[in-house]
Amino acid sequence: MPTAAAHGREDRTGAGREDASGDVAPHAGAQASGGVCSVLTAERLSKQVGSPEGPLTIVHDVSLDIASGESVALVGASGAGKSTLLALLAGLDLPTAGRVLLEGQDLTALDEDGRARLRAQRVGFVFQSFHLIPALTALENVMLPLELAGHAGAREPALETLRRVGLADRTGHYPRQLSGGEQQRVALARAFVTKPAVLFADEPTGNLDAATGARIGQLLFEMNAGSRTTLVLVTHDQDLAERCRRVVHMEAGRLL
Amino acid sequence: MRPIRLALRMLGREWRSGELGVLLLALTLAVATLTGVGFLVGRIRTAVAMQATQVLAADLRVGSPRPISNADFARARLDGLRSARTADMLSVVFDGQRSQLADIYAVTAGYPLRGGVLVADQPFARGEPAGGIPPRGVVWLDSRLLAALGGHVGSRVSVGAATLRVGRVLISRPDQGGTFTGLVPSLLMNAADLPRTRLIEPGSRVHYSALFAGQHAPIKAFKTWLEAHLSPGEHLRDIAEASPQIESAVERDGRFLTLSSLIAVLLCAAAVAMSARRYVARHLDLVALLKTLGASRNLTLRLTALQLLAVAMLATLAGATIGYLAQAWLARALRGVLAEGTLPAAGLTPVGIGALTAVALLAGFALPPLWQLSRTPAVRVLRRDIGPPPPAVLLAFGPAVAVIGALIYWVVLDWKLFVEFTAGLAVFVGLLTAAGAMLAAAATRLRGRVGVAWRYGMANLGRRRTESVAQIVAFGVGTMALLLLGLIRNELDSGWRRTLPTDLPNYFFINIPPRGRGAVLDFLHSHGARTARMLPMMRGRLTEINGRPVGSVHFQERQGRHFAMREQNLTWTADLGADNRIVAGRWWTRAQFGEPLVSVATEFEHWLGLRLGDELTFDIAGNTLSVRVASVRKVEWDSFKPNFLIEFPPGLLEKETGTYLTSAYLTPADARSLAAFARRFPGVSIFDIEDLLSDVRSMLDKAILAVQSVFLFTLLAGLTVLLAAVQSSRDERRYESAMLRTLGASRATVMKGVLAEFAALGALAGVLAVAGASAGAWFLTTHVLHLRYAFDPWACVMGFAGAVVLVATSGWLATRTVVKQPPIGTLRAGT
């Protein structure tokens, strides 16, 4: 099995990492190099799309192995292919070539609904533009993934998670009644409420001012540590990237 | 996972946030239109049919030369029907030394079951409702009979062996006409007095009738029972066989009303499609997010479908209520023009039809986009430029086309009309689309010529080309429907006025002796009457068709046998009447006078299944005459001028000619001279059709009111389409406006751009609507309504200006709030 080291440059110098390999929860999954349980594996992933100038390769032959409980930052210039790689890793999109294993399950072998089921149970998301549902209150937004996953009592865990992000007094507010930072905290609560195995975050502080972004970053890593969730983060925020155990650089669709 | 609960909860939340308002409004108005029109058409049709049944004085009428069996009446009682009997015979009535042959009409209590008897205290005076039948010992004589006898109200007349008192002057009874044959002055009496008259003896020629009336369903069932139990010689009549004038009016009214409702239905479909499109556009992100969070495609489809279904149910409830209230208002408005005072109660069928159609509209116009919505890839949460893959053409348009087709057929229920209408619609929408695309292209070129606002507006048209074309098509169809209705309504109105001028003949003069023709005309003209042409009249029977006895011929049409077997009224004439139009064959030339030819009316041709060249053999006063069908005429029966189903050329029947008939218009003042006329020409029968005309006018009034009401519904439907179209581009406009204002454009500049864009949209839609509506009005007027079409330039100018003003104003009103919003909020939100 290829390892992250085969294609990606690992940066293990980042200070303030929130997690360590010793804290990894014993998820079922492939065995990453070094004897650590691998929760997410990308094997020679490529993504090609059509364009007026002909076929365009956005992700080019990427292999990556992420251990359970690990935090990985995908960094690179705009257009480097970070978000596309994130979408492929999360099973939101299918690669043109290669495959993705999430806890040993080949995402490319599943149909759309199969991938959705897997996401409902094992994956959480945080987005740059929050992606809260405007028609739902903060509490209802957090309850939604639990309801979609078929949990009977969604209210209590949702309330509890909102308390953890400091929004116990905002549960009945609609997204438009919340500040950007508060909206992202609701998004964090929504991401963690299902206790996902892997959390994908796409520029989680990109739409926030520096101070708010820092607070959200802090909260993200605190909750990640508390939940022992594997974190895959796309960011331009150097501070945020450096808090990850591993930083993977991308350029023109390739890992450096 | 419980999708229904989740869908309803999300529906409630979305409703609170205002997301579903436009869709609900569109559907509610659609259902309100459908149910309102349904209630309206149903009630007016029933009312018109009820009024038409007055010609029979009943819903069903059985005629027989023998008394009608009591079993029929017992059965009718069991079925909860009302009934009455009449007996009709000719006899001489005496008043002292004076005598006059009269039609003795004896009736039982309850007569008439439909319509009313009008009486007065003076001959030829305006009648008032009698409110019953003559009491025992009392008779009501019609004006001519009373004038001929020189009697008055209160005098005594001898009818057979009985002496009876003249109680009132009979002005009209509902079943007095329809055919103008064998008319003699009439006397109405109580059937209980008949035995005293000793008029009915073995061998007497008496015509008996049984009258039945009641609710639609039991009448229908009773009719079926009666048809199976008719004795030999008995003949059953219902509205379908009533006067051809009434039948033609009912048919035309019904066709126009259903046509109007069809246009409203199609407009609603367009509004639903636009609303669904906006719903889908606004839910792409939600579906992508739900999928990202683990929802299956099936679940997202069910969630949105359940939400729309709930919206449809709400819309059905609200729409049906609005529709019911609208028709209740209309029922009150109609009360004044109805002879019977009230409209029949509204049935619940329209609610079911409204709900079914709402679901069908959603299935045809909302389900395909919803299907597409469910195909939104989850990756859209990261890349908003990614949407669902383009749909297969069949899936995108198939259900809508199927639903439109089903709706059109449901309304017209005629394959020929269906094909013509559908083809016309397809061509029109195609033309609109092509023309809209051309404008959008032209707008791109024109945008550099005038200032920045114009450029912004035109740029919008050109850049959102598909959307612009869609809006132009929608505006065009909406405006066209409104204009088409306006044009057709004008045509109908003026057509009716052309058909029913105020000086329409109101009296028929029958049994004019050949030698008295000149004297009759001189008398009438000297008393201010305007007469129609005078035609000879004789009686005859059709004995053979193409050499086969009519008794052995099988007729496809129900009326065929009756019309073939009965005694016919015949005439001969050199000239084709102005109210006749040859639809097959040729009218005879002078050289063909005396040739064995015949011209038949379209009704006779249709009922008997005749063709040009068929040989018809008649028995006329004992002589056999075989003639060939030379032409078929479309007769405007509602001209109320002398017309015949069967006409011969001159030179064949002069010897058999018995009497002549004509019709004339007399003012109420001139009509007073008719008493003198009756004394001078005692053998001439005068038939007053003023009351029949009043009935027809009353029905036309109702039809016009109904058309106006349907027009109002269609106007609302058109406005909903406009609103939905404007709403569909509201989000984009909000963002563009914010961008422009951020870049320094004033609010006025942005607003001018919006006005320029919508005015241009309205102008093109107006041009297309005027062209389409004119073509459509011509087609419908000439081919469906069978009226003459006159191009109305003023209405077209108004239609065009209306489209520009309406679209520009609607666009301005709907986008006003967008421009007013501070740009920073919109730019922060990102959309």
Image (cartoon, coloured by chain):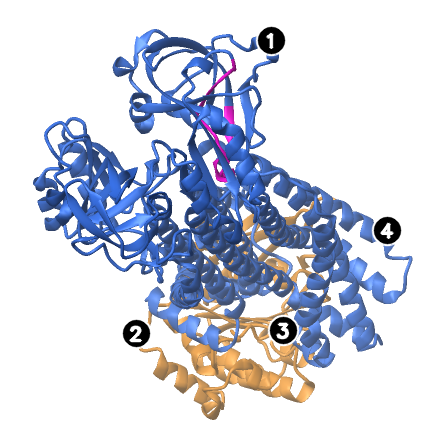
Chain colours: A orange, B blue
Q: Residue at x 64, y 40 (%)?
A: B789
The mark lying in front, picked from 3 and 4, is: 4
Kindly indicate whether the residues beneath marks 1 and 2 are on one polypeptide chain. no
Disc ID at residue B445: 4
Residue at the front extreme? B97
Residue B828 point in image, percent of width and height: 68, 78
Above or below, A142 against B312 in this view is below
Marks 3 and 2, how far apart in space? Answer: 32 Å
Report whether residue B378 is seen. yes
Please provide the residue range marked out in magenta.
Answer: B633-650
Subunit ID for the residue under disc 1: B
Is residue B137 rendered to the left or right of residue A138? left
Q: In the rendered image, which residue does mark 1 sit on?
A: B591
The mark lying in front, picked from 3 and 2, is: 2
Q: In the rendered image, which residue does mark 3 sit on?
A: A203
The amino acid type of the residue labelled 4 equals Arg
